[in-house]
Amino acid sequence: MKKIITSLLFCSIGAYFSIGAVIFYKIGSLSKMGPGFFPLALGLFLILLGVLNGVKK
Amino acid sequence: MIDNLLLGFQTVFEINNLLFLIAGCLLGTAIGILPGIGTVICLSILLPFTYGFDPITSIILMAGIYYGAQYGGSNTSILLNVPGEPSTVMTCIDGYPMAQQGRASEAIISAGIGSFVAGIFAVFAIAFAAPALSDIAFEFGPTEFASLMLLGIISISVITSENLVTGLGMACIGMLLGTVGTDINSATERFTLNQLELVDGITVGALVIGVLGLPALVTHLLDKNLENKPMEFKLRFSFQDLKRVIPSILRGTGVGTVMGVIPGGGAVMSAFAAYVVEKKVSKNKQDFGKGAIEGVAAPESANNAASQTSLIPLLTLGIPENPVMALILSSLIINGVQPGPGTVTEYPELFWGLLASMLLGNMFLLFLNIPFVKMWMKIISYPKSILYPLLISIALVGVYFIKESWFDVGTAIFFTLLGIVFIFCKLESAPLIFGYIIGPLFEENLRRTLTISDGSFMKFLESNISLFFLSISVIFILWSFVRKFNYLHRQLTK
């Protein structure tokens, strides 16, 4: 139960920020990061962590 | 050095600084004794009130609260088996059994003397290490800073959380919350929900009080353990006991001094490390957990040393290494001092004044804690149905007054709900707070590095200093997989 809530929390916060970054802000490239780059990268990483947390025993 | 210390004492003896040093020690002891309000919560409530202070006064006050709380916290751990501060968790393990055996006095006095010795030693450690480290820090560019911040984020996640995944997740949430507000590079307003109040970002005080403060106060309000009365005891101490604890105090001081400087470290982690070391090297291993005086003296010395040496990275690199330092940093910046490699030479009054204030503060705290411990413990006997609701209201009023904004009060309540979910899921909030404060700095340095290197991450491996920080980060990650469970995390969430 606790694990499911944690995973859901991580994935939804990650999704909120990464989707928001893609829709509203310029992403740019690694050498010229736009305002959306950092939130997108972190958001995706957070989703990954949420999935990892849900998968492992 | 003598000249510098004289300058420091001159600064401390200015009436304002002296008064706030005393206030910091008193307040630190009080919040140390009260379970549920730690240094982070106290400083975040206090933060709005330090705006407009002389930066020297505000750092003397805030540092005094941090090390003062290490003195106060041990008393509650020993007499009630409830940690007064997160950093005195380890003291419960042997301190409370000692109190049960009628040796509360020995425990309290050895904790007090240990803290004092460690505190004085830490001052000299800072005096020697900080100027030397500043010289190294002048060489740092954005690459080195970004790596160091990454190390801080990883180490605090590994140290405080049950596993790496949840710890990093909390740090990520913190860094994402840190992106709210105006992006410095492009002046774009990010994730502000079209609210004017969010243009400068989420107010630190509202976030900290919401995520950490109010949930902790509410939990303690509902905690039945606090209805226990503190143990009765008589003050006495023999030289035999003192002789027995001297080696433990010295070991604890050493461990604490070093652990305080490590990113992500601080009082909590150093007390834990000192206990583990002490248990390994002590001749009385079988007594540990049943009232070994060494198990009280070592972590209590360590947490006090670390609470002071953790100022070293802040004053030489400008990087806070734990949430307490992050709050001190925000207070300094608002009052016009941006700490960095030049702090020691550019602001000698601030640096040496702080050190002198620690010498005086430790003496004052020793005097305050040992003879008057019974008086202090009376704070705990106040009915908590009055005390904790009062503290909750003070916290909310404090949040309102940061910017005289109802929006911030709403923010704090929103984060309180989130904080309660975190407690339910046994998620540690420290990485979140740390990530929130370090996130924007990390983003800026990362972006600069990648702009310079034209998008290549090799730059991080080309610099020796950066490579060093990254290697330690890898060691932390590997360690988090190898260890069987996070003992510190278990103690804190028990």
Image (tube, rainbow, N blue to C red):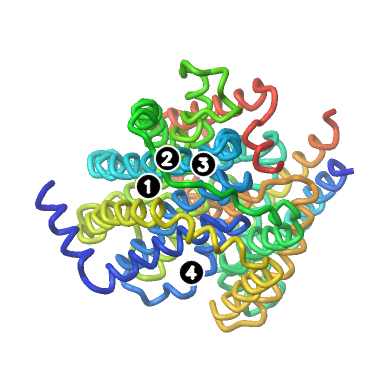
Assign the N terminus of chain A to one quadrant of the image: top right
Residue annotated with mark 4 = B47
Distance CA(mark 1)–CA(mark 2): 7 Å
- Neighbor class of circle 3 (other Cα within 10 Å; few <14, some 14-19, many 20+) is many
Same chain? Circles 1 and 2:
yes
**Of pointers 1 and 3, the one earlier in the residue sequence:** 3
Q: Nearer the viewer, mark 1 or mark 3?
A: 3
- Pointer 2: what residue? B260
Question: Residue B298, image x and y in percent?
Answer: 44, 32
Q: Are marks 1 and 2 in contact (CB under 8 Å)?
A: yes
Tag 3 subunit: B
Q: Quadrant of residue B153?
A: top right
Q: Which residue is mark 3?
A: B104
Does mark 3 fall on the same chain as mark 4?
A: yes
Q: Which residue is mark 1?
A: B308
Which numbered disc flags the more N-terminal residue, 1 or 2?
2
Q: Secondary structure at mark 1?
A: helix
The residue marked by circle 1 belongs to what chain? B
- Distance (Cα) linking label 3 and label 2: 28 Å
Is circle 1 on the same chain as circle 3?
Answer: yes
Q: Is residue B155 visible?
A: no
Q: Residue at x 58, y 69 (%)?
A: B203
Q: Which chain is mark 2 on?
A: B
Q: Nearer the viewer, residue B24 or B249?
A: B249
**In the depicted view, which residue is nearer to us: B313 or B67?**
B67
Dividing the picture into quarters, in which one does residue B197 lie? bottom right
Q: Is residue B280 left or right of residue B256?
A: right
Q: Are marks 4 and 1 on the same chain?
A: yes
Please tell me how crowded label 1 is: few (under 14), some (14-19), or many (20+) other residues with Cα within 10 Å. Answer: many
Question: Dot 3: what SS?
Answer: helix
- Identity, as a three-letter code, of the amino acid under mark 2: Gly
